[in-house]
Image (cartoon, helix red, strand yellow):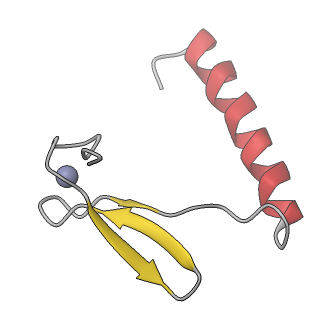
Amino acid sequence: MEECPRCGASLERLSLGEVSTVACGRCGYADIPVEHDSEGRDFESWQDALERFYDGAAGSTE
Ligand SMILES: [Zn+2]
């Protein structure tokens, strides 16, 4: 059983059609899988966001 990364409660497994994911009933956390196949641009922006994260972490408290 997986645990919520936020509050540590047991995650509930949900089936959304062909996609399976987990969600926390206590704090509302949800782990939504990213589909790289259909949304290539989202993957690029995600990479960009990650670079910004490391950039900001190195230069400020953000
Ligand atoms: Zn939770």
Q: Is residue 19 left or right of residue 45?
A: left
Q: Is residue 39 left or right of residue 5?
A: right
Residue at position x 53%, y 15% from top? 60
Residue at position x 23%, y 61% from top? 24
Residue at position x 24%, y 42% from top? 6
State whether residue 56 is above or below residue 39: above
In the depicted view, which residue is nearer to us: 9 or 49?
9
Q: Position of residue 18 (x, y in %)?
A: 59, 83
Residue at position x 11%, y 61% from top? 26
Total numbered labels placed on residues in the image = 0
Q: Position of residue 50 (x, y in %)?
A: 69, 34
Determine the residue located farthest toward the front in the rendered image. Answer: 1
State whether residue 34 is above or below residue 62: below
Q: Quadrant of residue 35?
A: bottom right
Q: Position of residue 41 (x, y in %)?
A: 86, 62
In the depicted view, which residue is nearer to us: 23 or 19?
19
Determine the residue located farthest toward the bottom in the rendered image. Answer: 17
Determine the residue located farthest toward the top in the rendered image. Answer: 58
Q: Is residue 59 left or right of residue 20?
A: right
Q: Quadrant of residue 43?
A: bottom right
